[in-house]
Image (cartoon, coloured by chain):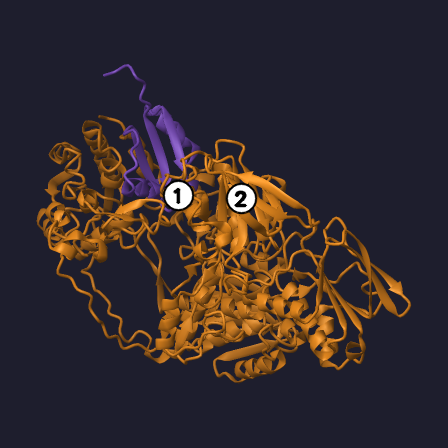
Chain colours: A orange, B purple
Amino acid sequence: MDKCIACGECAEKCPKKVTDTFNAGLAKRKAIYVEYPQAVPLKYAIDAPNCIYLKNGKCGFCAKVCPAQAIDFEQKEKTVRLQVGSVILAPGFSAFDPQKLDTYQYSQYQNVITSLEMERILSATGPYHGHLVRPSDKKEPSKIAWLQCIGSRDINRCDHGYCSSVCCMYAVKEAVIAKEHSPVALDTAIFYMDMRTYGKEFESYYQRAKDEKGVRFIRTRVHTIVENRETKDLSLRYVDENGKALEETFDLVVLSVGMETSKELAAFAGRLEIELNADNFAKTDCFSPVKTSRDGIYVCGAFQEPKDIPYSVMEASAAACWAEADLATSRGTLTKTKTFPVEKNITDEEARIGVFVCNCGTNIGGIVNVPAVAEMARTLPGVTYVEENLFTCSQDSQDKIKDIILKKGLNRVVVAACTPRTHEALFQETLRDAGLNKYLFEMANIRNQCSWVHSKEKDEATAKAKDLVRMAVARTRLITSLGQPTISVEPSALVIGGGIAGMTSALGLADQGYAVHLVEKQERLGGIALGLLNTWKGDNVPEKLAEMTKRVTTHSLINVYTGATVKASTGFIGNFETTLSVKGSDRLLKHGAVIVATGAQEHVPQEYLYGQNNRVLTHLELDRAISSDDPRLPAADAVAFIQCVGSRESKRPYCSKVCCTHSIKSAVRFKKINPEAQVFVIYRDIRTYGQRELLYREAREKGVIFIRYDLERKPEVKNDGDRLAITVKDHILGRDIEIHADLLILAAAIVPRDNEVLAQMFKLSCNSDNFFNEAHAKLRPVEFATAGIFLAGMAHYPKPIEESIAQAAAAASRAAVTLSKDRITVEGVVSYVKEFMCRGCGECERACPFNAISVQETDKAMLAAVVKEALCKGCGMCAVACPTGAASVHHFDDREVLTMVETAFEY
Amino acid sequence: MSGEFKPKIIAFACNWCAYSAADLAGVSRFQYPPNLRIIRVMCSGRINPNFILKGFQNGADGVLVAG
């Protein structure tokens, strides 16, 4: 594997074509292949069951053409024994196979495809290069239908009672992207039962898809698909909400398939002796959402429960957090540190540039005239040494480059080869081995961006390669050694908010051995959870909360400050100084990281007689009434719940996520206490995602009545003697019905707290709903854009306890990445300010997305911008914003960039 | 030389997205005309309007900022 240069010659010559499973079977690949173009490491592998040589001992074309001698047919599967302290399971899911369902004729009708096939069709690296065509005749479709809940929420035909959680959102996304890809006015329709867009920013995406993009949403289950044998178009038959039978024809039908655990994975879990639940997902509980039934084995992602990317990422970091806590005493015991010689000071030297031009076997050399490129390089000013290599990246070439740097006294190096994205670090290490600063290096990309993309135009490719080398050399004459300062780290964290999220983060860090300052505004730890009774899985919240609080207050590394607020904070990653106001007096703390876990609160409803009739309660009030044995509860003959009170409306467009589950859990409770009681849930979409769906089914089985309403016609609530009268239009009956209830429970929205103060203090951003914004919605769900500050719990978005805990443990894990280091090394490519040119206008401060530059008073009592190098990502926006030219970026200053523009076209 | 107009194009590509996309085009062997010169920057936010003018001044027929 070390030798493979991913040139693809082997796959080019391999005679065996195999169905490409990555492209969902829509394309062919060879028996030697990379699974997908973004694969890391980018190395080819032999698909043994399909390899002609491995089966018959004949062929071996790949080995003959491989320029790097990377093919070894003798490699055998090896059993490796590892001694480990903990195990994290992240095996993912299998997509449901719709062949099992005869309704959709997936294996018979060519234009019935799965959502994964649709993903590949829409992808630029997919089977049709991102052109939206249908499989039967490669015609561009003008009408596409998506059918939801295929293999989910269906116990009759596939035994998957759960909701797969992600399909509503991906179907909406596919419909929007398909419209963008299509050259015609594409008609898209999504056939669904409940639209479950409960994630952060999801509801507004759904609304935009509907209102602005014109995606049609049809609430029904399609019962029959009939194919027109000639055109291969598909006719969908269904019954609408009013009971009317309808039929509509589409060019392409996408089945939104759900997630399941494969039989192999279930068997693997059996060998690991971890318990699975009835749906074959790893069994966990809400207060330890990534711990399996076996100590030391953790789980994350869709094997725990169907879920999307951000929550999979959170769980992954959470699993790491708890594994790190288990292994805290042995941290660092197996690590090795490499040492380098002292760097040579080249400040006063003339440029002595060495240029190494790589053939990459025939990948570059077969197209670009490498000797001609090398010859040209010899003529360039500053170049004192030029060499061609078969493979510049091979180990013997590294040894040779190091040798030549020393012998020839080179002080800068240019490698013309593949791409810096994969190989810059390797060559930089070679420079460091030879005593040169790693920034005295530049690559010319003559493979990925030249020979590979101009393989039919050899002369032009050669001319371009010469230009690229000349540009790189011109730039290299100007680049200089850069320092990489290190900064110390205060190995403790400030956690703001003492609810479930804050306490989980505090424990996660303290259990790993870091001191924590936990700040809670109230006199008591616990936050919103103090008012909750049970989780949907039945965990007793007061008991678990008491255990957690006790662990926090007795932990030797956690300092708890109740009745405390954060007054002011300065500093940056590794080195924060924060002033707390604790019961009126100030306390100064030093810490290396911050976790914001300030939570959210329940909205105070303004409608449905709330506040006017004491029979109208919110969720939290209901839980309090239950725990205080309110006599009205067992006495109630009829109870109604109204959903989306203050959520999913123009003023507050997001879904509050937790309310459907909380209402249904409470409805079931009423039915358990008094099976004769009438219980109504008046809803817009039931969003019991994942296995919460089982609770919804239980409620229906127990006789809870679900009545849907539209935003345009909300239910009306009136006083009715000592009861309440609720009028709502029933969609099935098509007329108003009146419900008489003893109690009305409002699923009040979850609203953000006043996040403005902390946002200002730590320079954090909030979304349009006033929840804090994470650095990246999918891949960095617990980090802020500003380094060293992390986010957990409902301050990010409404979420149930298990998700708050996972996110909080994830935040602790990410914070520990910083706290575990004695010092942080800062990259050399950072901004700097020439103070004498700065007039302190602050344009740079406003432009910086990372809070890395700010105007401060100098010792000469002038205003000037100062860069916090630890926070700077080197993007250079300050340099562009600066009106005087005082701000610039090391390694990418104006001259270093513009010299490449000046030398771009000479051949 | 044919009389066909082949515009010279300078592209400023963000290291984290557009530049790696150009690499991926190579991995996928997508073919495109060779009269493009890509200059890597750490962020498209680094591109000063002057850089674009400088491109035209140095004979480019088009300047692409991708990020």
**Residue A820, percent across and down?**
38, 70
- In space, the residues marked 1 and 2 are separated at their CA atoms by 52 Å
Secondary structure type for disc 2: strand
Residue at image position (43%, 37%) is: A133
- Chain for disc number 2: A
Q: Taking A566 as reference, is A423 above or below it?
A: above
Secondary structure type for disc 1: strand
Determine if residue A491 is in view: no
Determine if residue A49 is in view: yes
Q: Taking A578 as reference, is A138 above or below it?
A: above
* Horizontal arrangement in the rendering, residue B6 relative to residue A744 (left or right): left
Specify few, some or many for label 2: CA neighbours under 10 Å numbering under 14, 14-19, or 20 or more.
Answer: many
Q: Residue furthest left?
A: A407
Q: Which mark is residue A450?
A: none
**Residue A732, percent across and down?**
73, 54
- Chain for disc number 1: A
Q: Residue furthest top?
A: B3
**Residue A499, percent across and down?**
59, 72
Residue nearer the viewer, A194 or A746: A194
**Residue A677, percent across and down?**
77, 73
Choose the circle earlier in sequence order: 1 or 2. 2
* Horizontal arrangement in the rendering, residue A237 relative to residue A454 (left or right): right
Residue nearer the viewer, A577 or A876: A876
Instruction: Give amino acid for label 2.
Output: Ala
Instruction: Give amino acid for label 1.
Output: Ser
Question: Label 1 belongs to which residue?
Answer: A888
Question: Label 2 belongs to which residue?
Answer: A145
Quadrant in which the N terminus of chain A is drawn: bottom left
Quadrant in which the C terminus of chain A is drawn: top left
